[in-house]
Amino acid sequence: MSRLQIVFPMALALAVASTAPLEAADPAEPVKKEQSLREKFALPTHVQMSPMMVPIRHRYMNTSAITLFLEPVNREDVGRICNNVPRIRDAVLRLLSRDPIPTYANKLQLDGIAERMMPAINVVLDEEKIKGVHLEPGMVNLAGRAGGISRLPFATINGCSGIKEIEEKLAAEKAKAKH
C-alpha cells in the first residue's frame, strides 16, 4: 500500500471531522462574547518601534539592526510615546554612539542595554512614561506578522500606526455615542 493511499483517507477524515457541526452548547455554560474595540484597546500593550541601525563594537562591522519594544507605565501614555518616536530614536542613537553594543562570537550582547536606555528615553518624554524596554536583534516585522515575536511573553504589541488607527476609531465611537 502506498503512502498516499494511507495518508489521503486520514486527511479526508480529519477535514470532515473539523467541519462537522459541534454539539449544542450547554445552556448553563456562559457564552464567550467577542471583545469590543474598547476592551481590546484597554489591554496592556508594548509599542514596537521600527527597526533601526545602531552602533556596535565588532571587529569587522560597526552597525547592526535592532528592534525596540517599549512598555508604557500607563496605557494612556501610548499616544505621547508614538508622538515622540523620532526623539526616542535620537536618544537611543546618542546613548549607543558613546558606548556601542558589544558583541561576542558574532552575536550582540544585549544584557544591560535596555536598562541603560530607559532613563534616556524617560528624559526625552519629560517624565517616567516607560517602565520597560525589550530589544530584539535584527529587523522584526511590525506586530509580529512573522510569527516569532508573537510567541514572546510580551505578545500584545502594536506599532504606532496601528495604535493611532485604534485611537481614531475610539474617538469616532465616542462621538457617535454622544449623539
Image (tube, rainbow, N blue to C red):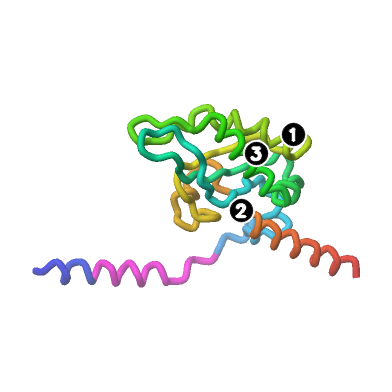
Instruction: Examine the image and state in which quarter residue 3 appears.
Output: bottom left
Instruction: Examine the image and state in which quarter residue 46 appears.
Output: top right
Cα gap from disc 3 to disc 2, whole angstroms? 21 Å
x and y, in percent, of residue 175 in the image: 86, 66
Q: Which residue is label 2 attached to?
A: 158
Q: Which mark is residue 91?
A: 3
Q: Most prominent secondary structure in the magenta stretch? A: helix
Q: Earlier in the sequence, mark 3 or mark 2?
A: 3
x and y, in percent, of residue 32 in the image: 62, 58
Q: Which residue is label 1 attached to?
A: 128
Cα gap from disc 2 to disc 1, whole angstroms? 20 Å
Q: Amino acid at mark 3?
A: Ala
Disc 2 + disc 1, Cβ < 8 Å: no
Q: Amino acid at mark 1?
A: Glu
Give the side of residue 162 with respect to residue 101, left or right: right
Badge 3 marks a residue whose secondary structure is helix
Q: Earlier in the sequence, mark 1 or mark 3?
A: 3
Residue 13, above or below 125: below
Instruction: Examine the image and state in which quarter residue 162 appears.
Output: bottom right
Badge 2 marks a residue whose secondary structure is strand
Badge 1 marks a residue whose secondary structure is loop
Q: Amino acid at mark 2?
A: Asn
Please tell me which residue is depicted at 60% across the width and 33% down the height of the picture. Answer: 95
Instruction: Tell me the crowding category of disc 1: few under 14, some 14 to 19, or many 20 or more residues within 10 angstroms, Cα based.
Output: some
- Closer to the camera, 157 or 110? 110
Q: Give the foreground label among 3 and 2.
A: 3
Confirm whether the magenta stretch covers residue 134: no
* Highlighted range, magenta: 9-24
Residue 144, above or below 107: below
